[in-house]
Image: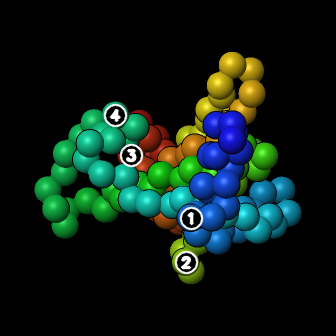
Amino acid sequence: MSIFNTVGETIRRYGSQVTIVQNGDEIQTSAFVEPLRYRNRIYIGGQYHMLGMNRRQKYLYIGSASHRLTENASVIESHGNKYIVKRCETYFIKDYPLYEWAILLPLGERTEDEYGSD
């Protein structure tokens, strides 16, 4: 079994049911959505915050490469929660897309970089 089949089957078999909403279309698929941990701080600005002071929860999305996402436009619905895609990339092996990954933010929250400077 090739790595492409293995990754695709793993996402289908073990991923949660999610809905991708973009451009008015809804796509039902499987993907992994999990909280980002401190070890992943490179993607969230590298800042530590006192617990309970700032809500900066980010989530990691891993899904099929056949469902491309768009930053600040795609919405992921999973387990009754909605998330906006803040950053996304397609992971390739050679010239072939293997999977789509994204950093998600709960829908409706604003991050520091969205506020204008004084």
- Which image quadrant: the C terminus? top left
User: Of marks 4 and 2, which one's residue comes earlier in the chain?
Assistant: 4
Residue 34 screen position, x and y as percent: 44, 60
Between the C-alphas of marks 3 and 2, the distance is 26 Å
| Residue linked to disc 2 | 79
Dot 2 amino acid type: His
Between the C-alphas of marks 3 and 1, the distance is 34 Å
Residue drawn at (67%, 54%) of the image: 9
Dot 4 amino acid type: Ile
Residue drawn at (72%, 33%) of the image: 97
Dot 1 amino acid type: Tyr
Rendered view: 26 above or below 114: below
Task: Classify 10 Å Cα crowding around label 1: few (below 14), some (14-19), many (20 and above).
Answer: few
Nearer to us in this view, 16 or 7: 7
Query: What mark, if any, has residue 14 been given in the picture?
Result: 1
Nearer to us in this view, 109 or 118: 109
User: Of marks 1 and 2, which one's residue comes earlier in the chain?
Assistant: 1
| Residue linked to disc 3 | 112
Closest to the camera, between mark 4 and mark 1, is: 1
Identify the element where label 3 is drawn.
Answer: helix
| Residue linked to disc 4 | 42
Identify the element where label 1 is drawn.
Answer: helix
| Cβ atoms under marks 3 and 4 closer than 8 Å | no
